[in-house]
Image: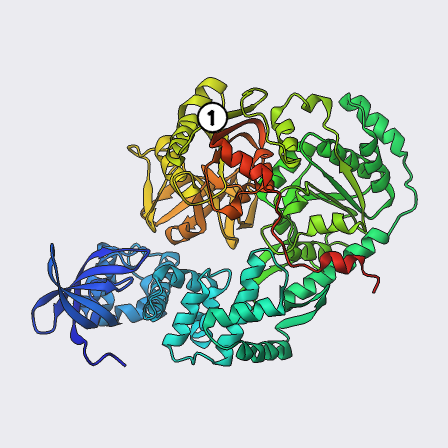
Amino acid sequence: MREQALERIAGQVAAVIYFNEESGYTVLRLQVDDGSQAIVVGCIPMVAPGESMVAWGEWTRHPAHGEQFQAAYTERTMPTGAAAIFDYLSSRTIKGIGPATAALIVGQFGDDALNVLRDHPEKLATLRGISLQKAQEMSAAFRQQTGIRSLMEFLGGAGIGPLLALRLYRVYGDEAMTRVEENPYILAGFQVGGTFAQADALALANGMEADAPQRIAAALLFELRHNSDNGHCFLPVEKLTAATAQLIGVDPEQVGEGLDILLDGGDVVCEPVGNVTACYLAHMYAAEVYVAERLKGMARYTYDAPNVSVERVIEKLEAEQRIRFAPLQRKTLDAAAVRQLVVITGGPGTGKTTSLRAVLALFDAMGLETMLAAPTGQAAKRLGDLTGREASTIHRLLGASYSPETDSTVFRKNETDRLRCDALILDECSMVDMSLMKAVLAAVGPSCRMVLVGDADQLPSVGPGAVFRDVIRSGIAETVRLTEIFRQNQTSRIVVGAHQINRGEVPDLRANNGGFYFLRRRTPDDTAQTIVSLCRERLPKNMGIPSGQIQVLTPTRKGPAGTAELNRALQLALNPPAVGKQEFTYAGRIFREGDRVMQIRNDYDLTWASAAGERGYGVFNGDIGYLDSIDPASESFVIDFDGRKAEYVFEQASELDHAWATTVHKSQGSEYRAVVLAAAPAAPQLMYRSLLYTAVTRAAELLVIVGDDGVIRTMTENARRAKRYSGLRIRMVSDE
């Protein structure tokens, strides 16, 4: 019910003067029913000339623009009458329809034009110049726009901007309105990406009581999901109850009653883990139990001695590669020959790659069909380059897709349709979280060998758990720790410096040789300016390294030396605007042909194609590519991910970040020819050793640290590891 104190005006939209895609803020000219005109401002997303509008609000006076009607609420109806429909369609609000096409459609169908456009695209195809395919595309665009507009108006009533409506529609399609009305909390699902506060505001605005069981249950589930995103598999019941009560302002006892409802419904599982009562999301509990049991069983399983000589395989490799295997590397092959589960861990320069290649050669000699995979596209490409074999991301290997019904990732390969291989080698395993490891184990056969390779001292997975570290700490699996830095790597100060940092020793920042350089800058602004200069001029000119092979890393997104500001400065320096170079602006950011970009959200439905004719689905969080081309007419653009080209529409720019500068967390699993690391003060929770160690080990040939040596010292000396609530290690060592 509208506020009685608000004034009401009604009329037809004559023109849209301004529209902000991010906020939905609009300035329009309204032809009022009494014959006057009014400037109306407010959140009125996707409005077009010709629409009928009723607005409630108040008259204000802008110091520069004069009298305006500030709309608090609006109700809009599609235009009626041929003249209004023509104004609406000719405004290009419907993709593919401009003034000429609008004239054709209205001239043929008159007052019934919008009904034909929505329900009978085949009739449009009878018009000159409109094919059936084009007619269907225009009809789909119209239906989508009206659906999105309704969503935007519904969400706007709770102060929620239009970007979430676009994502919600993309996930749920025509069912989006029904789904969000039934359960406003789907806004906070991981594919939609809204906050709990936004979903809660919508629920309360539409009449939900503050202590409603549905609200308490949603808050409990949010806390568990939120902490899952922070790496936790469970929360102790006391922490969960207290955090939920504080979040929504209810009594902890009421939260306990809500938790009982979730337990009875099977959404949450609570059981003792160590000395706490652990509360899990049901799927996370199932994943942890499954991973523990499968890994425990694999660790116990051994095969008969192979029909090939491990020693002869080593001799052959040593002759071909002109190397000598160290004792620990020989131990790796001895273990891989007879054990189902083998773990290889070690820092840079300790021979992980040589060991991995040797294991692969051994499996080949044994006649085993071996698959190779890694968590990210960059890591998989590097694995393929190092082995000369095809390597895939884990998501692509398992056929990942998204299920709107469960708001989760599902995998085509599972216990009913397993991978056809005898052995699976997983690289960069420190990045593999609990859910992904569960999916991998479900997809491999009972007798399939697994070799887990990684550096346990790097940052843990972004997702829940610390699986690789827990497997090593449990001691259940045959684990080979490679510790010796091989002679050919001892002159690399990147390698030596990384090991010093890992031991808690501050590397010598004055030497400036061996590929390791430090440039002292006392302020974040000076740090940022130096980084831009290095990428634009100094490294390409003095070191012969093109800008495209330089990756800037920083611990944080915020501040002058954070990713947001660095990317703006680097875009201007490395890819400035030019005549003929297309660009568009979305949510306040400029996207330009030639930009380096990163996918920041899994998109399972996005199609890609390679020049060789290969086609596939899915672009995943962390994939980096270049903006190949922009087509303003179709409001679409193409990104080239290492030869795989994917087409996006402008709205999907919300799934992208610029990637000249990325956070250290986003760089996991990647290796770059040159790394420029910003060492500027950041939040205390980002100033720790394993983050610095991970950053340094991303550089293959050249590392330049720019900033404050005090930051390097602080990070090196801070050996803390954020506690992650997980029961995996306890379950793996348990005999029950």
In-front residue for pair 479/399: 479
Image location of residue 107, percent across then percent down: 21, 64
Q: Can residue 479 be seen in this view?
A: yes
Q: Please report the residue visible at 83 percent of the width from the left and 41 percent of the height from the top.
A: 336
Q: Please report the residue visible at 43 percent of the width from the left and 60 percent of the height from the top.
A: 167
Q: Please report the residue visible at 29 percent of the width from the left and 62 percent of the height from the top.
A: 45
Q: Please report the residue visible at 34 percent of the width from the left and 63 percent of the height from the top.
A: 145
> Which quadrant of the rendered structure holds the N terminus?
bottom left
The local secondary structure at tag 1 comes to: strand
Above or below for 614 versus 56: above
Name of the residue lying farthest toward the top: 542
Image location of residue 201, percent across then percent down: 39, 71
Image location of residue 323, percent across then percent down: 78, 23
Name of the residue lying farthest toward the left: 35
Q: Is residue 446 visible?
A: no
Neighbour tally class for label 1: few under 14, some 14-19, many 20 plus, Cα within 10 Å: some
In-front residue for pair 176/659: 659
Image position of 110 (left or right of 360): left
Image position of 86 (left or right of 228): left
Above or below for 274 versus 547: below
Q: Which kind of residue does numbered mark 1 sit on?
A: Leu
> Which quadrant of the rendered structure holds the C terminus?
bottom right
Q: Mark 1 points at which residue?
A: 519
Image location of residue 402, percent across then percent down: 55, 60
